[in-house]
Image (cartoon, rainbow, N blue to C red):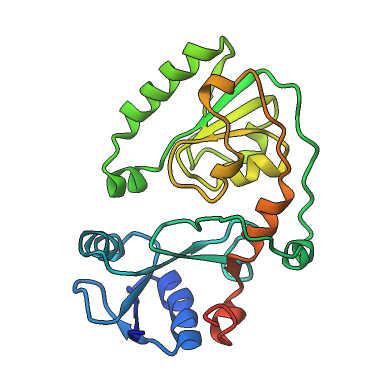
Amino acid sequence: MNDVDVYITDHQYSKIIGGAFQEGCNGRRVAPGKLYEGTPAVYGILRGCGEIIRQCDWLGRDYYHIDLGYLGRGHFDGHYRVSKNGLQADIDHTEYPPDRFEKLGTKLRPWRRTGANILVAPLSANMGRFLGIDTYQWCQAVKSEIKRWTDRPVLMKEKHEGEISSALGDCWCLVTHASNAAVDALIEGVPVITLGPSAVEGLSWDFSNIEKPAWLDRDPTFFALSHQQWSLDEFRNGKCWN
């Protein structure tokens, strides 16, 4: 296997998080701007890291993407996800034990079977630019599609507009591309529709089922999510890499 090139930018998060990952995988520390011979690992998509991902996609090369975790996330005492050849983990049908999930202390609320509004969580401007998606047009298309299937009010929740928990107060369903807001909604028992590659797409509804929900078992997905994220200590000591 090729050595790992961990791309470290001048941002504090990249230095600390990327540095911890580099230590645990015994990788080489490099700066964005050039695709080197090793397997790239990047934190986030800004400051040249997104360009490294694009080049890997064009050339069919493996890469590792690091970002805030699905559960118990937060700088720097929280968890960070690592996914291979994508921005989120591809959750397969492997049965994961509940140990890591239980240690987080996260409680899944019962499925919510009432609620008035459809909440839309758009892509951030940076993510839209990276994916080549016009966020305004995306929002217009999503709202139009929702109205094909339901007459419920449609509300918008931008990433910077407060906590997602308050926006979920009277929510029947959340629609997003692949935001972590989908994970937060599922914890609260609010169903989701994900429109992009998401680690929780196995629990996603279709628009046509927006009024005919399937109340699926969330436990296997959340057990899997907890095994796709690590603390900085687990980065440094090699547990994540192993």
- Vertical relation: 68 (above or below) 63: above
Q: Considering depth in this image, is 157 or 107 the residue closer to the camera?
A: 107
Determine the residue positioned at 26% across, 60% down.
57
Residue 155: image x %, image y %? 54, 23
Residue 213 in sight: yes
- Vertical relation: 32 (above or below) 161: below
Residue 72 in sight: no
Q: Quadrant of residue 62?
A: bottom left
Count of labels in the image = 0
Determine the residue positioned at 61% across, 40% down.
203
Determine the residue positioned at 26% across, 43% down.
132
For residue 7, side relative to residue 35 (left or right): right
Q: Considering depth in this image, is 62 or 70 the residue closer to the camera?
A: 62
Residue 123: image x %, image y %? 41, 40
- Vertical relation: 202 (above or below) 77: above
Determine the residue positioned at 23% across, 81% down.
37
Quadrant in which the C terminus is drawn? bottom right
Q: Quadrant of residue 227?
A: bottom right
Q: Quadrant of residue 10?
A: bottom left
Residue 230: image x %, image y %? 60, 71
Residue 106: image x %, image y %? 76, 55
Quadrant in which the N terminus is drawn? bottom left
Residue reaching furthest to the top:
151
For residue 80, side relative to residue 116 (left or right): left
